[in-house]
């Protein structure tokens, strides 16, 4: 495990829409709690009262891509200052459903904002803060789109994007995972929820050196 101090662990979960993230999020949280660890379970955009209001806007209102990126980072600033950092400092683990990697993938590769611009915002909003572990639920965009259709999901602004958009988002996630293999674990999310869950838990336990 990378983090020998009394600071908690910062663990994030990423993947394109339709990857089955919500079930696997609870697998991470429950496993850590089952080991007697204190966990703050949270999400982005959101995680604070103001962040949740910003989430509503970002998911539902038409806006330019740069406004979208700035609002996501505004929500993140509140989240880091009021939830994530304080919890980590108290020694609690933070499991977060998406973080800055989602911005690099969605607003960056998906919508074309240059990566260095997003990285400059990340450096402003959370200097020195990076997840200790990031689990990527990986699956082809077509599979994710089929699942969302089968679930009859209404779709927010992002979920209504075309399959090519999710192809770019997926490729960016895989590239980020290749760049930092010590932080990322790529899990094949084409399998059944139970198989994926087992893999997520095994990866977490290996990371914790259990
Ligand atoms: P969710 O469906 O995983 O709750 O995430 C909400 C949507 O927000 C999802 O489609 C991805 C998108 N999103 C971004 O575009 N940029 C970001 O930085 C974050 C955190 C999420």
Image (cartoon, grey):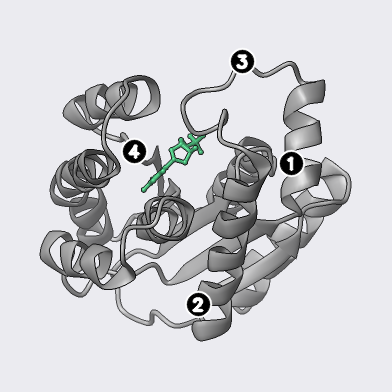
Mark 2 Cα-neighbour bin, 10 Å: few <14, some 14–19, many ≥20: some
Of tags 1 and 4, the one toward the viewer is 1
Q: Position of residue 22 (x, y in %)?
A: 61, 36
Mark 1 Cα-neighbour bin, 10 Å: few <14, some 14–19, many ≥20: many
Q: Are marks 2 and 1 in contact (CB under 8 Å)?
A: no
Q: Residue at x 72, y 48 (%)?
A: 141
Q: Which residue is mark 4?
A: 45
Q: Which residue is mark 1?
A: 144
Of tags 4 and 2, the one toward the viewer is 4
The answer for how far apart the CA atoms under marks 1 and 3 are is 14 Å
Q: Which residue is mark 3?
A: 154
The answer for how far apart the CA atoms under marks 4 and 2 are is 21 Å
Q: Residue at x 75, y 54 (%)?
A: 139
Dot label at residue 183: 2
Q: Residue at x 26, y 63 (%)?
A: 118
Q: Are marks 4 and 2 in contact (CB under 8 Å)?
A: no
Q: Residue at x 30, y 35 (%)?
A: 47
Which residue is at the front of the view, 41 or 112?
112
Counting residues from the N terminus, which is met first, the one under dot 4 or under dot 3? 4
Q: Secondary structure at mark 1?
A: helix
């Amino acid at each position: 495990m990378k983090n020998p101090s009394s600071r908690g662990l910062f663990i994030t979960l990423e993947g394109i829409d339709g990857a089955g993230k919500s079930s696997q999020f609870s697998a991470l949280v429950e496993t850590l709690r089952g080991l007697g660890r204190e966990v703050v379970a949270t999400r982005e955009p959101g995680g604070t009262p103001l962040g949740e209001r910003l989430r509503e806007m970002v998911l539902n209102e038409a806006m330019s891509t740069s406004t979208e990126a700035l609002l996501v980072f505004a929500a993140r600033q509140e989240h880091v200052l009021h939830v994530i950092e304080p919890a980590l400092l108290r020694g609690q683990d933070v499991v977060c459903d998406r973080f800055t990697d989602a911005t690099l993938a969605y607003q960056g590769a998906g919508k074309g904002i240059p990566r260095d611009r997003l990285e400059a915002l990340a450096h402003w909003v959370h200097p020195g803060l990076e997840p200790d572990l990031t689990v990527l639920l990986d699956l082809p965009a077509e599979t994710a789109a089929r699942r969302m259709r089968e679930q009859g999901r209404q779709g927010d602004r992002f979920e209504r994007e075309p399959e090519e958009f999710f192809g770019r988002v997926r490729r960016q996630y895989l590239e980020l995972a290749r760049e930092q293999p010590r932080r990322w674990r790529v899990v094949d999310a084409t399998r059944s929820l139970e198989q994926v869950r087992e893999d997520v838990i095994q990866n977490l336990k290996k990371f914790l050196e259990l």
